[in-house]
Amino acid sequence: MKLRILDSALEDLDRGRQFYERQGEGLGAYFLDSLFAEIESLLLYAGIHRKVFGFHRLIARRFPYGVYYRVDDVAVVVVWRVLDLRRSPAVIRKALS
């Protein structure tokens, strides 16, 4: 299985890093390390997560973020978005469309 992270997901991760770095020095780097570890776990566990708005959603353990992804026919996990789950469902749905 292969992993592909779209630019939209990388932009989400960068926004999250900037937010957490403003909260405390080094917290942004910890955020990225944690979320990338969660994303890498998809190489083993892709497809087991509940579907939400047409995407599988992995809920991060240390931060209130969801990793929205799909598994395509050639065994590639495509990470579409990494979104803050404290937002309203309407905002998340719009971000995924």
Image: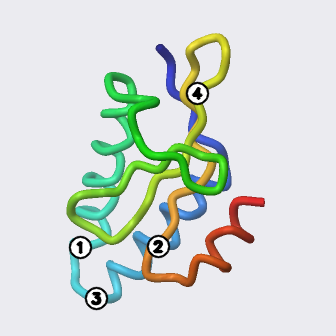
Q: Amino acid at mark 3?
A: Gln
Residue where numbered disc 2 is placed = 84
* Mark 4 or mark 2, whichever is nearer to me: 4
Residue type beneath disc 4: Val
Q: Which residue is mark 4?
A: 71
Secondary structure beneath dot 1 equals helix
Q: Residue 42 placed where, x, y %? A: 38, 32
Q: Tell me: 27 left or right of 56.
A: left
Along the polypeptide, which appears first: circle 3 or circle 2? 3
Q: Earlier in the sequence, mark 1 or mark 4?
A: 1
Q: Nearer the viewer, mark 3 or mark 2?
A: 2
Q: Indicate whether 64 appears above or below 74.
A: below
For the residues labelled 3 and 1, the Cα–Cα distance comes to 7 Å
* Residue 44 on image: x %, y %: 32, 23
Q: CA distance from mark 3 to mark 2?
A: 15 Å
**Residue 39, image quadrant:** top left
For badge 1, the amino acid type reads Leu
